[in-house]
Amino acid sequence: MSDTTIDLHGVQALASLPRLRVLDLSKTDIEDDALAALHTCNTLQELKCSETMISSAGLQKLQQALPSLNIHHDGVFAEGHNHEDDE
């Protein structure tokens, strides 16, 4: 789904797929509300979300909901700070 016009409804539909394991939302306009749709996607193992409008707080909430999820992010968030600042 990278570099597409996917929106909240699209992510909700994808999250309902019973065998979804890897999702690439990089280079999309996805925001934190779309991440909330993934909180119950227990099959998801890897999320790529570089160059999005996702905030550090949104990623932290998702990581709490899915602790084993491997998240790939470029570290630049909508607020304009780096993920490394959160550690």
Image (cartoon, grey):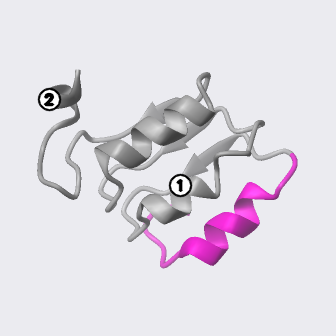
* Left or right for 62, reference 41: left
Residue for badge 1:
35
- The residue under the point 57% across, 55% down is 36
Residue 68 inside the magenta-drawn segment = no
Quarter holding the N terminus is bottom right
The image quadrant that residue 34 belongs to is bottom right
- The residue under the point 83% across, 56% down is 17
Residue type for callout 2: Asp
* Other residues around mark 1 within 10 Å, as few (<14) / some (14–19) / many (≥20): some
- The residue under the point 63% across, 65% down is 11
* Disc 2 to disc 1, C-alpha distance: 21 Å
The image quadrant that residue 74 belongs to is top left
The image quadrant that residue 42 belongs to is top right
Quarter holding the C terminus is top left
Q: Is residue 66 above or below residue 20?
A: above
* Left or right for 28, reference 55: right
- The residue under the point 77% across, 37% down is 43
SS for dot 2 = helix
> Please, which residue is most extreme toward the right here?
18
Residue 64 image offset from top left, x and y in percent: 54, 30
Residue 10 image offset from top left, x and y in percent: 64, 73
Query: Which label was assigned to residue 48?
Result: none
Residue 61 image offset from top left, x and y in percent: 48, 40
Q: Earlier in the sequence, mark 2 or mark 1?
A: 1
* Left or right for 73, reference 30: left
Residue 7 inside the magenta-drawn segment = yes
Residue for badge 2:
85
* Other residues around mark 2 within 10 Å, as few (<14) / some (14–19) / many (≥20): few
* Left or right for 48, reference 74: right
Give the residues in magenta: 1-18
SS for dot 1 = helix
